Amino acid sequence: MSSNGQVEIGNCHENDKSLKRINNDRQLTYSQLYLCAVIIGIFGGMVATVYYFVLETMMHGMWHNLPEIIKPYFPSWLGVSNYVWIATTIGGFCVGLALYFFGLPGEMAQVVDKIHDPGKIDIRKTPSMIVASLIAITSGGSAGPEAPLVQVNGSFGSWLGDKLKLAKTSVRILTFCGMSAALGAFFGAPIGAALFALEIPHRRGLQYFEAIAPAIIAAIFSFAVFRLNTGITIGGFYHFEEVPALSPQNLLEGLVLGIIGAGLAVLFIVIFRIIGKLLKPLEHYPILLATLGGLSIGLIAFAFPQTLFFSETQIQTVIETGAGLGVGLLLAIALAKMFAISFTLHSGFLGGFIFPLFFIGANVGYAVSLAVPQVHPTVGMVCLMAAINVAVTKTPVSTSIILSVLSGTAMLPVIAIASFVSFVLTSQITMIKTQRCRDLQEVDPSNLTLEQVVLAGEKETTIPGLARLKQLVSI
């Protein structure tokens, strides 16, 4: 009996020491945290603005000005149309040089891993990420700027938390604020963007719930700054054909399209892994790997020009011209895009794959509507855009919100059905292998302090971990 008591006293002393160490880390008040979120949001909006204008200038120069300049000097036997694969190959070589001299800054899987532990992103990799990603996206790779912006702005949040000497949990919240700011500017849907940043570290739902409010605040301010500076329209980004009032049939269509989207996502992941294995022997030769990747991207684009770039604007082209392309060509473009994304990401081209996945869904969705006229083109496209992205990123809530905003439609219920059907069917399949549950060390009962509380009837009892759990979510 006495020995058990000594063990309990010893454990309490250890917990008290742990609590003191925790209390030495600074925590922010609500007002201070929201002020930091505003600062990070404004900073994120400015970074996104500068990045946007630099990227637009580089892409216009490479794909509009330069072809016009060299066109008179292009060999007659080669043909100007070959500029595509030549440009992507040279671009790949430049990407390889950037990675060789600056080092590999990391990609989304590494960002997800760092969010869990140590809860922050290294800001020292920001210069290499900016340079390498700008070259990669300009060169026509099937990857967008969301991943570079997430790392850049997320690392700023981490840096700010370190400068303020905050606890790990608070630094992580500011990191999420930076990530949300980046996505808020990029997607134009602040709430959906913040939820996306909070969902993507996990495979089965959002777990860092204490960061929701500050993350949304940061996303809103970043969104406002970016839109004011760029003049981009606020609201529906794509002009889909208007859908009649939703009916029970549409709900059933959402379910079926969710199943189709899950199957397509599995096909994409299989292709992605096969390309990764084929290119693995070259991973220690970044210049050669990126050059071959650029050549592959260019040859695919030579056959299917629609696969070039990260597809943000190409989706509108599908909306406008899909009916004239036909089922076969739409499906071929979607398959070619899967290979383009795989070569892009495995060869060192830095960027995100959200809009490229949307593009695949848009093509297949339109093909479904042509093959089955009862399915409205907008329903087919938006539901498959959601289903494929959710199966890969495991973000059903945020993807549903983002696509309902981007499409400018009232289709949220149908989109949500397609998203969650795909999410459930692919729960055992993952592409971002670092996605996992919240660090169990933070909520391990053996590390939690005991706290006396009074229940109804004035009866005292002990609840393990109440004080520790309060500190984990303290803001």
Image (cartoon, rainbow, N blue to C red):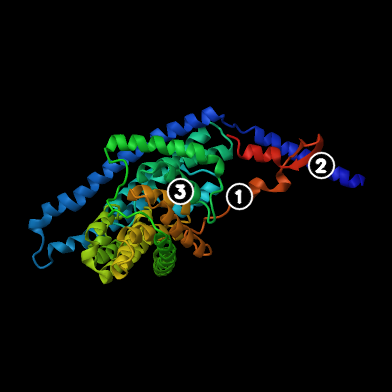
Circles 1 and 3: CB atoms closer than 8 Å = no
Pick the residue in front: 409 or 303. 409
Task: From the image, tell me which residue sits under label 1.
Answer: 439
Q: Quadrant of residue 86?
A: bottom left
**Of the residues shown, which amino acid type is indicated by label 2?**
Gly
Q: Residue at x 48, y 58 (%)?
A: 420
Q: CA distance from mark 2 to mark 3?
A: 43 Å
| Disc 2 to disc 3: CB gap under 8 Å | no
Q: Which mark is in front, 1 or 3?
A: 3
In the rendered image, residue 358, in percent from the top left (x then y), is placed at: 35, 57
Q: Is residue 212 in view from this perspective?
A: yes
In this picture, residue 207 sits left or right of residue 140 = right
Crowding around mark 1 (Cα neighbors within 10 Å: few <14, some 14 to 19, many 20+) is few
Q: Is residue 274 above or below residue 72?
A: below
Say few, some or many: other residues with alpha carbon within 10 Å of mark 2 (under 14 / 14 to 19 / 20 or more). few
Could you tell me which secondary element the residue under label 1 belongs to? loop
Q: Amino acid at mark 1?
A: Asp
Q: Secondary structure at mark 2?
A: helix
Q: Residues within 10 Å of mark 3 (few under 14, many from 20)?
A: many
For image coordinates 78% across by 40% down, the residue present is 462
The residue carrying mark 2 is 10
| Residue 140 relative to residue 25: left or right | left
Q: Amino acid at mark 3?
A: Phe
Q: Is residue 349 left or right of residue 67?
A: right
Q: Residue furthest right?
A: 1
Residue topped by disc 3: 196
Quadrant position of the C terminus in the picture: top right
